[in-house]
Amino acid sequence: MSTVVFNPFDPDFRRNPHPVYDQLRAQEPVHFTPLGFVVLTRYDDVVHTLRSNDFSRDIEKNAILPETPTRKFRRENERSKSILNLDPPDHTRLRSLVSKSFTPSAIERLRARIQQIVDTALVSARRSGRLELIEELAFPVPFQVISELLDMPTDRVDELRDWSQIITATLEPTTGVAELEKAQVAIGKMRPYLDEIISRRRKNLGADMLSSLISVEEQGERLTNDELMAFVILLYIAGHETTVNLIGNAMHALLTHPRQFAQMKSLGCTPQMVDELLRFDGPVQHTIRTPIVDTSILVDGEQVAIERGSLVLASLGAGNHDPSVFENPHLLDFSRKNANRHLSFSAGVHYCLGASLAKLEAEVVLTTLVKSFDKIEAATEPEWRDRLTIRGVTKYELSVQPLTSTR
Ligand code: HEM
C-alpha cells in the first residue's frame, strides 16, 4: 500500500517536486489522486501517453468528468480551440500552416537580432552591478523576440504581460471558475486589441509571421478568424511565458552548481547544456491527456486499468528524472550524452513548435550573461511561482560584477 501523498499545494512540493516524483515513480507509478487525476511519473509511460493515438489532447470533448461549474464555464466560453487543444486531423492542418516559420534554419537566422536584444537588456546591469533577472532579462528578451516575429507593437507590454499571466493560470489542473472568469475578462481585452492589429495587417501584409498566417493557404484552406485569433494568442503567450522560466530556472541551477557555472563560463552555453538545463528543471512540469478507449499500464506484472475519459497528468518533470533513462538524474551534468531525450517540450504531435527558438534564446542569454560579468551571485533567494503546470521563478535579484577589463 503506497503512502505517497501528491499534494500540489504543498509549498515544499512547489520548491522541489522531485522527492514526491521519486516516491510516486518507485511506489505507485500510476497514481490515482483524490483530486481526480491519474498521475504518471515513469518516462516510458509519459512518452507512450503523449505519442499514442489512444490519448486525446481535446479534454473538453473527450474527458468524462463530473459536470462542475468550471467545465460548464469552459464549454460555454470557448470560441475556437488553439492547436494545443486539438487532435489530428484538425491539429495537423493548423500546425502545418506555421511549422515552416519554426524550422531550426529559419530560427537560426534570428541569432544576431537576439544578441542585440540581450546586449541592450544588459546595459543597465553593466553600469549598476545589479540585475533583477526576470524583470530585466528573462521576460523582456523572449517578449521582444516574439513581438518582432509577429510584428506586434510593444507599447502595451505591461497589459499584455498581465493578460498572458491571467490566461496561463487556466492551464492549471486545479483552475476554478474565479480564474476562468478573470481569464475571460483578459481575453475580452486582448481580442479587440489583436483584432485591430490583424485587420490593419490584412490591408498591409509584410514579411512577418502574422502576415504569413493571414495569407497562408494550405490545401485551399484558410484559417478562420477565430482560428487565427486563437493561434496568435497561443504563439504570443507560449512565445514568452515559458522561455522566461527556462532562463530563470537555468540561472538558479547554475548559481547553485558552481562547477557547472564555471564550465559554462569557459565554453559558453552550448545546445547540450540547454538540453541538460531543460531536463534538470523544465518550465512545463506536466501536460494533460484523456484516453479515448479503456486502457491500462503494466506495473509490477499487473495491468492497472485507466478508464476512457479519465484525466491523465503526464509528468514531464518526473519523466525527466527517471533513473531508468537518466543516470544520476538529480545531478546537473553537462556531459550527459542523452540529455536531449528530455521531455520538457513534450513528445508526439504536440511537441513544442517553438523548441528551436526557445533553445536559441536561452543559449544567447546564458552565454552573454555568464561571459559579461566576473562574478554573478544571488542577492536574494528566488521566489517560486505559485503554479503547478508552469514552474518558474518570479523574482530573482542578482548582484553582478562587471568584467575587470571594462571597468
Ligand atoms: C522553454 C520554453 C518552452 C517550453 C518549455 C515549451 C513547452 C511546450 C510544451 C510542453 C508543449 C506541449 C504541451 C502538450 O504536449 O500538451 C508546447 C507546445 C507548444 N509550444 Fe512551446 N514551449 C516553450 C517555448 C515556446 C515558444 C518560444 C513558442 C513560440 C514562439 C512555443 C510555441 C508552442 C506552440 C505553438 C505549441 C503547441 C504545439 C502543438 O500543439 O502542436 N513554445 N510547448
Image (tube, rainbow, N blue to C red):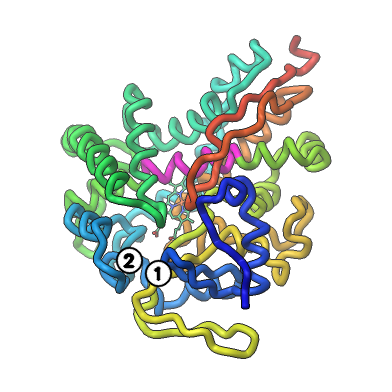
Amino acid on which disc 1 is placed: Leu
Q: Amino acid at mark 2?
A: Ile
When asked about the image quadrant of residue 218, the answer is bottom left
Q: Residue at x 50, y 66 (%)?
A: 314
Q: Nearer the viewer, residue 265 or 204?
A: 265
Q: Position of residue 135 (x, y in %)?
A: 52, 26
Left or right position of 200 against 108? left
Asked if the residue at label 2 sits under 8 Å from ligand 1, the reply is no
Residue 301 appears in the rendering? yes
Task: Name the residue at 36% across, 58% down.
Answer: 84
Q: Is residue 73 left or right of residue 65?
A: left
Q: Position of residue 224 (x, y in %)?
A: 17, 54
User: As drawn, is 165 to the left or to the right of 313?
Assistant: left
Q: CA distance from mark 2 to mark 1?
A: 8 Å
Q: Position of residue 71 (x, y in %)?
A: 26, 60
Q: Look at discs 2 and 1 and give the one toward the viewer.
A: 1
Q: Which mark is residue 103?
A: none
Decide which of 10, 95 is in the foreground and name it: 10
Q: Which mark is residue 311?
A: 1
| Residue on which the image places disc 2 | 59
Q: x and y percent of residue 2 in the render? A: 62, 74
Q: Quadrant of the C terminus?
A: top right
Identify the element where label 2 is drawn: helix
Based on the displayed image, in which of its 4 quarters is residue 320 positioned?
bottom right
* SS majority, magenta: helix
Q: Nearer the viewer, residue 71 or 260?
A: 71
Q: Sequence order check: which comes first, mark 2 or mark 1?
A: 2
Residues in magenta, as a range: 235-248
- Asked whether disc 2 touches disc 1, contact meaning CB atoms under 8 Å apart, the reply is yes
